[in-house]
Image: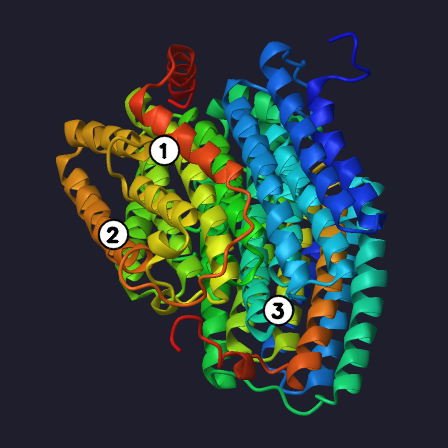
Amino acid sequence: MTVLPFDGLSAVLAIPLIAAAVLAVLPGYRGTALLNVLASFLTLLAAVTLFVVRPETGPLLLVDDLNIVFIVLNTFVGFTTSVFSASYIAHELETGRLTPTHLRFYHAMYQAMMFAMNLALVANNIGLMWVAIELATLTTVLMVGIYRTHEALEAAWKYFILGSVGIALALFGTILFYVAAQPVVGEGLDAMTWTILIERVAEFDPALLNVAFVFLLLGYGTKVGLAPVHAWLPDAHAEGPTPISAVLSGLLLNVALYAVLRFKLLMAANAQAIAPGPLMVTMGLTSLIFAAFMLYRRRDIKRLFAYSSIEHMGIITFAFGMGGPLANFAGLLHMTMHSLTKSAIFFAVGHIAQVKGTQKIADIRGLTETHPILGWGLVVGVIAIAGLPPLGIFMSEFLVVSSTFAREPLLAVLLVFGLLVAFGALLLRLNGLAFGEPQGSIAPVEASYVPMFAHLALVLTAGLYLPGPLVTWFQHVARLLG
Amino acid sequence: MEHLAFDVAHMLAGGMVLVSFMLLYQDRMYGLLNVFALHALVLSLSVAWEALVQGAPHLYITAAIALIVKAIIIPLALRRIVQRLNIHRTVETVVGIGPTMLAGIGLVALSMALMLQVTAEADALARQDIAFALSVILLGLLMMVSRRNAVGQVVGLMSIENGLILAAAGAKGMPLVVEISVAFSVLVAFMVIGIFLFRIRERFDTVDLHALDSFRGDRQ
């Protein structure tokens, strides 16, 4: 890598940061949208180089086998969403929902958010990780409120207040972690460095760790969207621009979950502290079952899929909470599949809502007849997210269920119950959306289908055949997760 | 000397809890902002004292930020907003003051019982700071749920942030990165809030969140 002036790690952080600054001042639409795509693509390339050249672990930044999976997924979905965003935003400009000034702001915020998320993923310092997640929250709040309508403002306000409270609880947990670490590790940066903490955590005071973890789980759990602290999520998804819904569901929730996982690893390394698993299992199952029932009463298409995100984050948290190589493997796979599928669904939903001029489920019918490509794309996406074979989510859900059956049959019954309830709700809604008498505008749509079908193709491929190296890699990470 | 150091720190941190209680029962907008300024002032004194006792000069910066930004600039700016929007009448509360105060006392008792027990092995100064800080945080949360008004919620949120800074200052030798970032994030957060308040005003002629509640997503 000597040809490049800097390594992949700094590129992953520097490219979005520079792009954000440049996009904040550049006028015009075509050029900036293209630059946004280009910057996202370069970030993805930089992330991929991390597989080849692993930078050394510093006191602040870290790349290890766990977070590299998250980084590559993050930058990949960030790139495809920027492609979708370009065509989506063009339409928003035409209809006048966004003004050129707002657009400049939108692109700058998009890159700032990518920077914050990448920083949260590579942070080796638990304080830095917190700062990055806070920054990601602020940027997304601003984007959710960008339409400045009544509903968008309320959604952004709710997200802002609940997100800040969550972030505040997480910071208190972080401080308590430092207080627990300080007598053993000593004062200063070392006591917040993850790689040092994990080596010494066995000697920390377990009572303090327990309290700290509860705060961290509640705090970052708010950002994961776990019930009962999920209230911001459906509003934020429904009222912001659809590319933001896609990155919220596909990426930001993962980043918050990653923070929880890092602390779970720390907790697991201290023998006297409470096991973090049961707490995560409880929150995950609650979210799954709660969201599954809520799916039935949704009348807004973006809200429907927002609740589906709560459901899936519940499943993933559940899987990681169960722990063990198989459940962790299933959790990782499910997380990847969910990110890809859910963002593909939002790509479809974004264009659908634009062409129909509404997000109300009742006013959207017969999509497969009026807009066959979008309609069938949505059908495949929903079938995937509902967990039907042969798509990838079926496989990961099957693994979660089967590994749970082997260990805790009772929990598995609850899990399957939640999955079936959600399955019913999704297929019920899909039937109305995709088939039947067409309703609403039948105008042709200028959409970029590539991101959506690229994601769906990946999900299908994963369902049929997982490449050997990927399986080995995930197995390796799953073992690390304990 | 050590005894004195501990006593003063104890008094200042306890003072913050007291001011948090005062925040709970304010029913006028200006009163609320004045008491918040006092809250920030006590925080800055408390952090400055920690800086002196711990011999940690970087904490003076945190204290100065708390004093200048939170005790002076933010209350003045909020006061201007309140004046401009003409909302300086009474603040609507969800529950009566009596039950809120009782709930507050319960929360403080809870945080003391919890924190003093689990931090038994930690440094005495850090121990009391963290117990008081948790009280301030919980009282701030209580304030946020007991106010309908946007300004009231923002003040509640900022009092939570004050509690966090108290905890961070009490944790001996906690790296500077975090304190600055806390103060910084509050600044940014405040900007966001400012924009929001004005936007809300633009649209609805009110900052009463109750009016915003007419929108309930799905329940059309």
Q: Where's residue A289, x and y in %?
A: 26, 52
Q: Which residue is mark 3?
A: B156
Q: Where's residue A432, x and y in %?
A: 28, 60
What is the number of the mark on residue A73? none
Give yes or no for contact between labels 1 and 2 (Cβ–Cβ under 8 Å): no
Depth check: A26 or A271 in front? A26
Q: Is residue A193 visible?
A: yes
Depth check: A379 or A180 in front? A379
Give the structural element (helix, strand or loop) at label 2: helix
Left/right of residue A50 with respect to residue B175 in the rendered view: left
Give the structural element (helix, strand or loop) at label 1: helix
Left/right of residue B61 with respect to residue A376 in the rendered view: right
Mark 3 chain: B
Mark 1 vs mark 3: give the one in front. 1
Q: Where's residue B15, x and y in %?
A: 68, 66
Above or below residue A191? Residue B32 is below
Give yes or no for contact between labels 2 and 3 (Cβ–Cβ under 8 Å): no
Mark 2 vs mark 3: give the one in front. 2
Depth check: A276 or B130 in front? A276
The structure residue drawn at horizontal position 40% and vertical position 78%, both measured from the top left corner, is B220
Left/right of residue A93 with respect to residue A439 in the rendered view: right
Gap between marks 1 and 3, in whole Å? 38 Å
- Circle 2: residue type: Leu
Q: Report whether mark 1 lies on the same chain as mark 2.
A: yes
The structure residue drawn at horizontal position 57% and vertical position 28%, both measured from the top left corner, is A71
Q: Which residue is mark 2?
A: A427
Pointer 1: residues within 10 angstroms few (<14), some, or many (20+)?
Answer: many
- Circle 3: residue type: Gly
Give the structural element (helix, strand or loop) at label 3: helix
Pointer 2: residues within 10 angstroms few (<14), some, or many (20+)?
Answer: some
Q: Which residue is mark 1?
A: A334
- Circle 1: residue type: His
